[in-house]
């Protein structure tokens, strides 16, 4: 199996396609967005990820990676399209279903189809296999179909694609084995075999575990604020217990993984998933709490309040604003107050509804400073630069300078 077609050339699809091209596969990247396809075929990238620009340039120049707006024939198909949730928090499988449908025109007996998108339990069987076999009944029993969830960390994707252990689950044993053998050609971590349902649940469980633990830290931050206790010091002290490891609070939980995936478990088992649902609600409630704190500071301001918001990405040192609690906070404040709001996000050029300011401009103008995403450049802010400002530090970034 030497040719691979990657469907969806975003944060997961593009690095995966590029890595496979570097390992000798002939890769066709497919995306419904023609702009994305154009950029990739110029050897450039449309997302921010360290070292990816050089790798894509090399892969395109070598002829091993080419992007298309329509699916191409291949031995292996990898679906890496979005899996958001709907207004009722149920999974939206339209992208996966459309991607599965779109490859039906080029699929051939013996092909391997892998769903990499984070998916609800049963999706590989229902939203991929059933969709394909309904359109191409003559292929029943002649394809290998599997799920292999992606668990890379943005900012470290190229390294983690190779080094992380992978969980691979097929709709049948032959599919599991074929898909696992494919991953073993480029993954240095261990490739662990299971069923497609368990592989889907494994990914959702990993993110629900993170969410529940972050919710614990976020809840502590509210309790400590009420009781006048410094939560950062508290967590530092509690973590000196040899079997305690509390995570850090923040302005909420963002991104399209941890803030989304636990809902897929809740949707599948609403009666049983009580803790998982509550954790989601605690984390989703944190941005409102931050907005209330900023409004309280604004009401106390001796001069006209100017609110400086530091960091809009959902986590440090990435350009990804999707599902970011910081963005939610910025918009909620804009609705709630006439005070001037200055937004500083060094990793993006523009943000809907706001004019972005540099860090120097924000520090010079704001009298209420809200630390939301602790990007590296913000860690160098000095005590002198904070003087005279009301500070709302959702990340504990200023602990270092303020003590
Ligand atoms: N980004 C991450 O860090 C990360 C980590 C683990 C898992 N995931 C999961 O991987 C999946 C993909 O996420 P992403 O971050 O790469 O998304 P993304 O939005 O960056 O990219 C998805 C791409 O798919 C394209 N697309 C949509 N429908 C298509 C179709 N029918 N055919 C072809 N292309 C189509 C879009 O134009 C877009 O370019 C999601 O399920 C996500 O939850 C993401």
Image (cartoon, grey):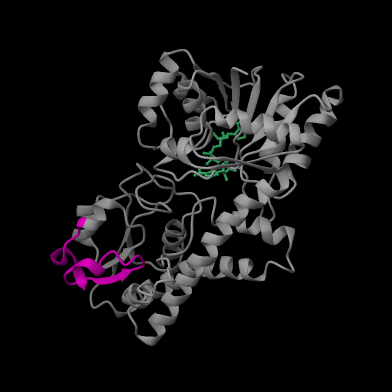
Residue positioned 72% across, 50% down in the render:
121
Looking at the image, which is closer to me, 350 or 152? 152
Q: Is residue 393 magenta?
A: yes
Looking at the image, which is closer to me, 382 or 34? 382
Instruction: Give how far across and how far down residue 299 sits, in percent.
Output: 34, 78
Image position of 349 with respect to 361: above or below: above
Residue positioned 39% across, 81% down in the render:
224
Q: For the N terminus, give its image quadrant.
A: top right
Direction from residue 74 to residue 186 in the image, left or right: left
Q: Quadrant of residue 397?
A: bottom left
Looking at the image, which is closer to me, 186 or 335? 186
Instruction: Give how far across and how far down residue 115 sits, in percent.
Output: 65, 36
Q: For the C terminus, give its image quadrant.
A: bottom left
| Location of ligand 1 given as a quarter of the image | top right
Direction from residue 84 to residue 156 in the image, left or right: left
State the extent of the magenta-drawn residues as a range: 380-403
Q: Is residue 67 magenta?
A: no
Instruction: Give how far across and how far down residue 396 sits, in percent.
Output: 31, 67
Q: Is residue 8 visible?
A: no
Instruction: Give how far across and how far down residue 63 sits, in percent.
Output: 47, 12
Image position of 380 with respect to 126: above or below: below
């Amino acid at each position: 199996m030497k040719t691979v077609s990657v469907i969806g050339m975003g944060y997961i699809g593009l690095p995966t396609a590029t890595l496979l091209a570097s390992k000798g596969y002939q890769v066709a990247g497919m995306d419904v967005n023609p702009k994305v396809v154009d950029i990739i075929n110029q050897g450039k990238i449309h997302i921010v990820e360290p070292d990816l620009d050089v790798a894509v340039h090399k892969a395109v120049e070598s002829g091993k990676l080419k992007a298309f707006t329509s699916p191409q024939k291949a031995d292996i198909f990898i679906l890496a399209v979005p899996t958001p949730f709907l207004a009722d928090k149920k999974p939206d499988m339209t992208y996966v279903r459309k991607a599965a449908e779109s490859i039906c025109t080029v699929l051939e007996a013996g092909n391997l189809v892998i769903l990499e998108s984070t998916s609800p339990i049963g999706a590989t069987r229902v939203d991929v296999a059933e969709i394909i076999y309904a359109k191409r009944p003559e292929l029943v029993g002649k394809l290998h179909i599997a799920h292999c969830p992606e668990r890379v960390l943005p900012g470290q994707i190229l390294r983690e694609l190779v080094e992380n252990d992978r969980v691979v689950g097929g709709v049948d044993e032959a599919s599991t084995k074929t898909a696992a053998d494919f991953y073993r050609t480029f993954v240095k971590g261990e490739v662990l075999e299971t069923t497609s349902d368990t592989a889907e649940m494994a990914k959702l469980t990993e993110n629900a575990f993170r969410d529940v633990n972050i919710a614990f830290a976020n809840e502590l931050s509210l309790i400590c604020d009420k009781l006048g206790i410094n939560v950062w010091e508290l967590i530092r002290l509690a973590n000196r217990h040899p079997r305690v490891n509390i995570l850090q609070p923040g302005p909420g939980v963002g991104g399209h993984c941890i803030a989304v995936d636990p809902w897929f478990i809740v949707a599948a088992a609403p009666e049983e998933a009580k803790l998982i649902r509550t954790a989601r609600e605690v984390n989703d409630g944190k941005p409102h709490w931050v907005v209330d704190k900023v409004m309280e500071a604004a009401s106390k301001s001796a001069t006209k309040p100017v609110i400086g918001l530091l960091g809009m990405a959902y986590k440090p040192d990435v350009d990804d604003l999707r599902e970011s609690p910081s963005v939610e906070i910025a918009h909620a404040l804009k609705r709630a107050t006439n005070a001037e709001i200055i937004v500083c996000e060094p990793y993006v050029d523009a943000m809907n509804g706001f004019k972005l300011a540099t860090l120097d401009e924000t520090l010079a103008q704001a009298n209420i400073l809200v630390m939301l995403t602790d990007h590296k450049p913000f860690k160098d802010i000095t005590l002198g630069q904070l003087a005279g400002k009301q500070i709302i530090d959702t990340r504990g970034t200023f602990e270092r300078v303020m003590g």
